[in-house]
């Protein structure tokens, strides 16, 4: 029987998946699907199209799960939380606001944290509230 426990390792697995999805889609280093595909326009190959479709499927899975789990209000609160944290980092001088590469990496990492939280939130909420799903009940 499967275990319905949720731990930090489960969250970090989701976080790593979000990191791979987001940084494979775009990153400032130029090693991303965006940079790979943009150089091939208008001669898109089936491999480029297939890779883009895989990324699109990943984005849809993460966004739908996050919307269903956190909802619009939860996403707004998560963005506000991480946005003010990022604002403090810039205000304290840890990162310069005009450093586009650093700001992009931090923004993408924040997006990863929000998506990983969205993928995990239903498990966390169930553990915090003590709720049991119908699938969890043994006969």
Image (cartoon, rainbow, N blue to C red):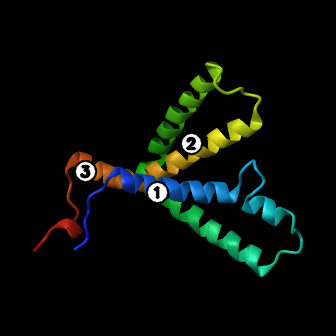
Count of marks, rendered view: 3
Q: Which residue is mark 1?
A: 14
Image coordinates for residue 9, horizontal then vertical, percent: 38, 54
Q: Nearer the viewer, mark 3 or mark 1?
A: 1
Q: Quadrant of the C terminus?
A: bottom left
Q: Which numbered disc, 3 or 1, marks the residue that appears first in the sequence?
A: 1
Q: Is residue 14 above or below residue 139?
A: above
- Please, what secondary structure does the residue beneath circle 3 have? helix
- Please, what secondary structure does the residue beneath circle 2 have? helix
Q: Which numbered disc, 2 or 1, marks the residue that appears first in the sequence?
A: 1
**Residue found 23% across the figure and 47% down from its top:** 129
Q: Which numbered disc, 3 or 2, marks the residue that appears first in the sequence?
A: 2
Image coordinates for residue 81, horizontal then vertical, percent: 49, 33
Left/right placement of residue 97 relative to residue 110 reads right
Q: Is residue 56 visible?
A: yes
Image coordinates for residue 82, horizontal then vertical, percent: 53, 35
Q: Which residue is mark 3?
A: 127
Q: Quadrant of residue 42?
A: bottom right
Left/right placement of residue 49 relative to residue 135 reads right
Q: CA distance from mark 3 to mark 2?
A: 24 Å
Image coordinates for residue 30, horizontal then vertical, percent: 78, 54
Left/right placement of residue 68 relative to residue 38 reads left
Q: Quadrant of the N terminus?
A: bottom left
- Please, what secondary structure does the residue beneath circle 1 have? helix
Residue 58 shows which numbered tag?
none
Q: Is residue 70 above or below residue 79?
A: below
34 or 9: nearer the viewer: 9
Q: Which residue is mark 2?
A: 110
**Residue found 59% across the figure and 58% down from its top:** 20
Q: Is residue 55 above or below residue 96?
A: below
């Amino acid at each position: 029987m499967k275990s319905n426990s949720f731990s930090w390792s489960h969250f970090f697995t989701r976080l790593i998946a979000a990191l791979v999805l987001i940084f494979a889609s775009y990153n400032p280093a130029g090693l991303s699907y965006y940079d790979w595909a943009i150089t091939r326009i208008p001669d898109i190959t089936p491999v480029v199209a297939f890779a883009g479709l895989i990324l699109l499927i990943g984005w849809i899975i993460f966004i739908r799960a996050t919307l269903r789990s956190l909802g619009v209000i939860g996403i707004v609160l998560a963005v506000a939380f991480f946005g003010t944290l990022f604002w403090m980092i810039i205000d304290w001088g840890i990162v310069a606001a005009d450093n586009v590469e650093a700001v992009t990496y931090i923004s993408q990492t924040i997006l990863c944290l929000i998506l990983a939280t969205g993928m995990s939130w239903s498990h966390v909420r169930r553990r915090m509230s003590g709720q049991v799903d119908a699938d969890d009940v043994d006969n």
